[in-house]
Image (cartoon, helix red, strand yellow):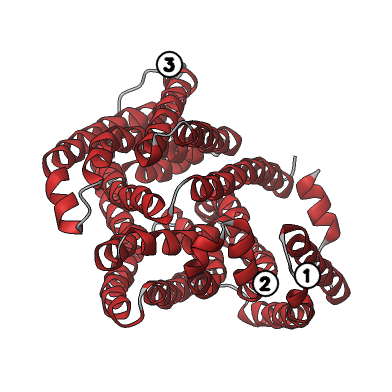
Amino acid sequence: MTAGAEYLRRFRSALLAEAINVGAAVVLTVGLARLMDPDSYGVLFLALSVLGVAQLLSAFGVSKSAGRYIAEYRETDPAQLPHILRSAFTFNAATILAVSIVLLVVRDDLARAIGEPALEPLLLVGIAFVVGQTLVTFCKQTIQGFEDIGVSSRLVAANKVGRLVGALGLVALGYEALGALVGYVASSLAVSAVGLAYLYIRKIRTAPDEPIESGLRRRLARYSAPIAVNQTAHSLDNYIDTIVVGAMLGPAAVSYYTIGFQLARFLGAPMTALGFTLSPAFGSQKAAGRPDRAARLYETALTKGLLVYVPAAAGVVLLAEPGVEYVFGADYRGAVPVLQVMAAFVVIRTVQTLSSDGLDYLGRARTRAVIKLTTAVANVCLTVVLVSEMGVVGAAIATVATSSCYAGVTCYLMHRELALRLRWLGRRIGEILAITALMSVVVWAIAPFVTGIVTLAAVVAAGVAVWGLAGLYAGTLDVALVRRTLS
């Protein structure tokens, strides 16, 4: 099997799992919105934002550091792989314990500081969520290092489906936000148990018993530090703004912001799958003396991603109002302007997703950490300023502005590492913008005819048809590649 065919096979596995993830997450997001009022919905996602910060702190970059060294030692000294796994698990167990104790002690103070007493029981149950979700991340990223993309992707998909069943089921039984969180907890604990069993049986128990390389544990721990900074910055970008919105504007505003942010993330799912698949290959190809192959992989992935997401972002802007009203309900109309601003985030994530993990596998985690932390702190400061002036829309503007800066710098760093063909990329992006403009004119012309879910779906289908035909005419849409990817 050629390298390209192997990457395509892995991408299909990741894409299928990501499709399941998105399907489950969309049903969960819409289902919870339909079953809960905006205040209860906002309290749940406010709690998940606080717990998300705690979970990233408990992960502390250990699993991604392990994934990086697993990818490297698979090529140079496979006998060290069990030592990497054991050491990483020991480090992570310590960080999980420390964060869990701190959260147990400060949960009351956190709820009071945010101004939402209803958070306290959710944060107590959330300690188990932090444990389970950190272990799921450990399994996902270490298995990714082995390039067992199918296994890693299935674990993540199982977690999302488990959340869907557990959370919706308990909310439907009347347990509201607490019941939804219990569903999240049960899913993460079950999936992490399966993942850890897989790592032990397939990667540790059958490995040869050789002594650990001198200094390996120290290097593993040291490389986790810049990744931990990246993850701390990630928590500032993805969770602190939600907490700021909750503290300044209340739970209902959190529900509006969450809908916009979540839908932007859902749309980026295929790019997440592609970045997850290719990022270990960037490092392994460069380590093997083939940086040009890594560059072509990145260029192709980036342009194909932009071909999908630039038109998708335009469609979100044009159809946000009927989309929110007919999918989530009239109570959530406050999410419309947030979603329109966050449409730009769909495009930004195309670059972010592909570049960020790639830089980690290329050994540039320390540089990325500085950039990420800088833009994340800027995001928090800008969010506070803009929320006070513009309300919840200000938080969306802050996220888009600072994320754009981060995406641009990471793309530049990838160019420095791999020597990308900038003129070639410029021509392709020009073609994509032309296709987007044509599609947008058609969607804008027929959008007033939307009167419900059926007509909304028809307008979306018309936009996709115009996009596809324009892409075929311009030669930017590769039908053969799409067929190979989906078959």
Tell me which corner region of the image, top left, top right, bottom left or bottom right, holds residue 139: top left
Tell me which corner region of the image, top left, top right, bottom left or bottom right, holds residue 402: bottom left
Q: Between marks 3 and 1, how big is the CA–CA gap?
A: 52 Å
Identify which amino acid the numbered label 1 is placed on: Gly
Q: Quadrant of the C terminus?
A: top right
The numbered mark at residue 406 is: none
Label 2 neighbour load within 10 Å: few <14, some 14-19, many 20+: many
Q: Look at the image and tell me whether residue 75 can be seen.
A: no
Which x, y percent locates residue 169? 50, 31
Query: Which mark is nearer the camera, 3 or 2?
Result: 2
In percent of the image, x 52 and y 56: which residue is there? Answer: 286
In percent of the image, x 76 and y 78: which residue is there? Answer: 435
| Pick the front one: 211 or 367 | 367
Name the residue that disc number 1 marks: 463
Query: Which mark is nearer the camera, 3 or 1?
Result: 1
Q: Quadrant of the N terminus?
A: top right
Which x, y percent locates residue 131? 30, 33
Q: Is residue 424 left or right of residue 285?
A: right
Which x, y percent locates residue 406? 41, 72
Which element carries disc 2, helix, strand or loop? helix
Of callouts 3 and 2, which one flags the residue occurring earlier in the amino acid sequence? Answer: 3
Q: Is residue 145 left or right of residue 470?
A: left
Label 1 neighbour load within 10 Å: few <14, some 14-19, many 20+: many
The numbered mark at residue 315 is: 2
Identify which amino acid the numbered label 3 is placed on: Arg
Of callouts 1 and 2, which one flags the residue occurring earlier in the amino acid sequence? Answer: 2
Which x, y percent locates residue 218? 23, 41
Label 3 neighbour load within 10 Å: few <14, some 14-19, many 20+: few
Q: Between marks 1 and 2, how big is the CA–CA gap?
A: 8 Å
Q: Between marks 3 and 2, how big is the CA–CA gap?
A: 51 Å
Name the residue that disc number 3 marks: 205
| Pick the front one: 243 or 434 | 243
